[in-house]
C-alpha cells in the first residue's frame, strides 16, 4: 500500500477581516483532511493555502460558500 501524499490547494477568496478569519477557522479546523491552512491577507486576492490529505477543491469551495465567502481555485 502506498502512502497518501500531502496535497497543497490554493484559492482566491473574499476573506477580508480578522472576524472573517475566525468564521473560516471554525469551519476549516473541523475538516479532518486539513492538516494546515493560512490566508495571506497582504495579497490582493486574499490567498487561502491548504495542506491536506485527500481533499477535493470542490469540497473547500463548498465549505467556503456555505460560510459566506467567495472562493476560486487557482491553477498550479
Image (tube, rainbow, N blue to C red):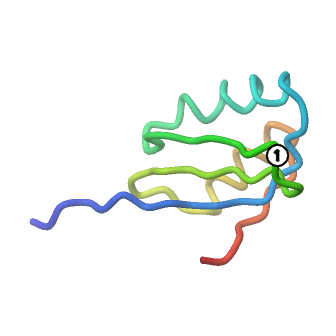
Q: Which residue is mark 1?
A: 42
List x then y, in percent, for residue 65: 81, 48
Q: Quadrant of the C terminus?
A: bottom right
Q: Residue at x 74, y 53 (%)?
A: 47
Say if 76 sits above or below 67 in the image: below
> Local crowd at mark 1 within 10 Å, few (<14), some, or many (≥20)?
few
Picture mark count: 1
Q: Residue at x 84, y 30 (%)?
A: 20
List x then y, in percent, for residue 53: 39, 53
Would residue 51 be found to the left or right of residue 44 on screen?
Answer: left
Would residue 69 be found to the left or right of residue 23 on screen?
Answer: right
Q: Quadrant of residue 73?
A: bottom right
Q: Secondary structure at mark 1?
A: loop
Give the camera-side residue of 60 and 43: 43
Say if 61 sits above or below 75 in the image: above
Residue most toward the bottom?
A: 75
Give the camera-side residue of 60 and 22: 22
Q: Quadrant of residue 39?
A: top right
Say if 22 sits above or below 1 in the image: above
Would residue 12 be found to the left or right of residue 37 on screen?
Answer: right
Q: Residue at x 65, y 31 (%)?
A: 27
List x then y, in percent, for residue 57: 61, 62
Q: Residue at x 9, y 65 (%)?
A: 1
List x then y, in percent, for residue 75: 66, 77
Residue most toward the front?
A: 42
Would residue 45 be found to the left or right of residue 62 on screen?
Answer: right
Q: Quadrant of residue 16?
A: top right
Amino acid at each position: 500500500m502506498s502512502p497518501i501524499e500531502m496535497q497543497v490547494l490554493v484559492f482566491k477568496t473574499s476573506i477580508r477581516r480578522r472576524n472573517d478569519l475566525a468564521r473560516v477557522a471554525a469551519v476549516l479546523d473541523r475538516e479532518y483532511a486539513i492538516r494546515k491552512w493560512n490566508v495571506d491577507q497582504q495579497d490582493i486576492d486574499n490567498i487561502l493555502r491548504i495542506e491536506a490529505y485527500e481533499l477535493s477543491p470542490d469540497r473547500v469551495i463548498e465549505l467556503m460558500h456555505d460560510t459566506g465567502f467567495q472562493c476560486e481555485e487557482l491553477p498550479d
